[in-house]
Each structure stands twice: as structure tokens, then as C-alpha cells.
Image: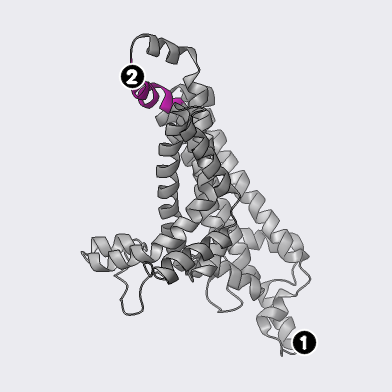
Amino acid sequence: MRERVRAIAGRVAGFLATLIGASLITFAISHLIPNDPARLAAGDGASPEVVAQMRERLGLDQPIWEQYLRYVAGLARGDFGLSIRSGEPVLDELLRAAPATIELALAALILIVAASLTLGAVAAMNHNKPIDHAVRVASALSLSTPTFWSALALIGIFGVALGWAPLGGRLSVDVDAPAAITGLVVVDAALAGRFDIAVDALAHLALPAVTLAIAAWGGAVRLFRAALLDVLQQDFVRRARAAGLSPWRIATRYAAPPALVPYTTAMGLTFADLLGGAVVTEMIFNWPGLGAYTMQAIAGLDFPAIMGFTLLAAVVYASINLLVDVLIGVIDPRTRSQRA
């Protein structure tokens, strides 16, 4: 029990260390950039007196260590600063943009998991057969295809040529968004009983979700295939075969749980990557999420917004790592003693 508590305490300490490291990095970068945040906040035509007043208001006239302590104290209160572009709290803007990215990332993750588990298992169970080679070639093509090319190809085929899917946004112009409950339009529409809105939202979600899934699908298929192949070659699997169990029963009941351990870890990091790396997809499909918000902040040199997104990404990565540890213990209890 003590070892288990010690292990949990170590993970929490690692979580806090990640956040402190992220705050130090973002704070340092904001002071290394040559542009003056006070001048940007005051405006291009501001006089030196106004800039000086803004510098004092922002606390930039204080010693560097005091600025950092004020910065950390503000973060502890949920104060990410004010956006230079809009003048609104950065945290409020991030929370408004986050549901769109979460919805997109979740949809992409569902596609990735469904495709990789199915095709990875089929390829592993047919090792070195034509279907295995076909899956490996398809995964290689996925890994070598740029995201922007996939997006433009999907738009050209399914959006323009066939007209099966809308070209951008979360909803059609003539469709009103449902009352926000979770922030996920598909879920909120279903909860409100407005399945017509849910269908429209799913149509808008399809192409960007597939675009994101294509970028990560190939690696996930290869990972699960390799992990399952490794387990299928172990002694306990040979004994199960000798007992007369069917190959698919062996794969699903005995080989899959240990093979899912590295796969679950990778999928956790993949989901974090989807949340933080959907910039290109969101820009192409006019998706109002964190990626589009961050690109606008970068274009406008909105340092508080950029720093806020960086810290949010650090929190997401650290939180997902903790969640993955818990899930691995559920999937394969043997790892609990190893990680304790």
C-alpha cells in the first residue's frame, strides 16, 4: 500500500514539475522576444508616456523574479492575462475555443482507434500474407501524406466533386447552434433531441476528422500490429494453441490485453497531439478551435494568448499521462506492481 501511495505521489509531483517547467519556459520566451508587450498593448500610435504607464500596469517595470512570481500567482487563480487583440481574459477565450477542438480530436481518435485495432489485428493474425502487406503499405502511405494534401484532396473529392460534405465550419449558416451543455455540438444537439442539428454537425465534422485521422492512423496500425505480433510469439500463447483454442479467441482474450499496454500509452499521446496540433486542419476547414485561435494570436503577436495556449497544452499532456497510467493498470493489472 505504501509503495502504491508513493507511486501516486511521484506522478503528482511529476505533474506539478511539468506545469512549473512550462510556466518557466513560456515566461522566459515572452521576455526573450524582441517586441515590447507594453507597446503592443498600448497600440502603435501610443506616446512614450502611455507606453510607460502600460508597462507599469502590466508590472513589466518590476524585477524579473517578481514578474515571474506575479505570473505564477495569477496562473494559480486562473488568470492567464488579457488578450492584446481583444482585451478579454485569455482563459475565457481558450475555454470558448476548446470544445470545438475537443470535439474534432475525439472524432478523429475514434476513427484512429477503430481502424488501427481492426486492421492491426487482421494484419498480425495474417502475418506475411497479402493482407498483411496491403495493410503495411496503406499505413506507410498514411504516414507519408501531408495533412494539408489530405485535407485538400478530401475537399476536392467529397466536398466539391461529389457534394457529399460541407466545406467548413461546425454548422450550416441556416442552422442555429443548440444550447451549450458540453460545448460539443453533436452531443448537445442529441441531448436536446435535435437530431437534425446533430446530423448537420456530423456532416461538418466528417472531413476534418478524417483528415486528422489519416495523419495518425498509419502509426497506430503499425504499433498495434507489432505489439500483437510480439505477444503472439510468447510461450503462454503457444500453450493456448496447444489446448485447441481458436486463433481469434487467443488474440482477443489472451494476447490483446498486454498488446494494448503500449498502444494505450501511444493513443493517449496521440490524443494530446490531436488537441494541440490541429492547426492546419482547423485553418483549412474554418474550424473555430484552439488551433485557429493560436494562429490568429501568433499573427497578431498576442503573447498572453500564445503563452496561455502553451500552458494549456502542458496541462493536457500531463493530465493525459496520468490518465494513461490509470488505464494501463485497468487493462493489464500485472503492470500495477511494476509501476508501483
282 sits left or right of 24 in the view:
left
Q: Which residues are magenta?
A: 245-258
83 sits left or right of 51 in the view:
left
Q: Position of residue 242 (x, y in %)?
A: 38, 9
Q: Which residue is mark 1?
A: 48
Q: Which mark lies nearer to you, 1 or 2?
A: 2
Q: Identity of the amino acid at label 1?
A: Pro
Q: Residue at x 36, y 62 (%)?
A: 184
Q: Is residue 257 magenta?
A: yes
* Element assignment for label 2: loop
100 sits left or right of 316 in the view:
left
Q: Is residue 35 above or below residue 15?
A: below
Q: Residue at x 34, y 62 (%)?
A: 202
Q: Is residue 329 above or below residue 192?
A: above
The way the protein has been coloured in the rendering is one colour
Tell me the number on the disc at residue 246.
2
Q: Depth check: give the residue in front, 316 or 9.
A: 316
Q: Is residue 39 above or below residue 243?
A: below
Q: Depth check: give the residue in front, 16 or 189.
A: 189
Query: Can residue 337 be seen by looking at this rendering?
Result: no
Q: CA distance from mark 1 to mark 2?
A: 80 Å
Q: Residue at x 50, y 45 (%)?
A: 320
Q: Identity of the amino acid at label 2?
A: Ser
Q: In the orientation shown, which residue stands out farthest toward the left?
A: 193
Tell me the number on the disc at residue 103.
none
Query: Can residue 126 be seen by looking at this rendering?
Result: yes
- Between disc 1 and disc 2, whose residue precedes? 1
Badge 2: how crowded within 10 Å, few (<14), some, or many (20+)?
Answer: few
269 sits left or right of 68 in the view:
left
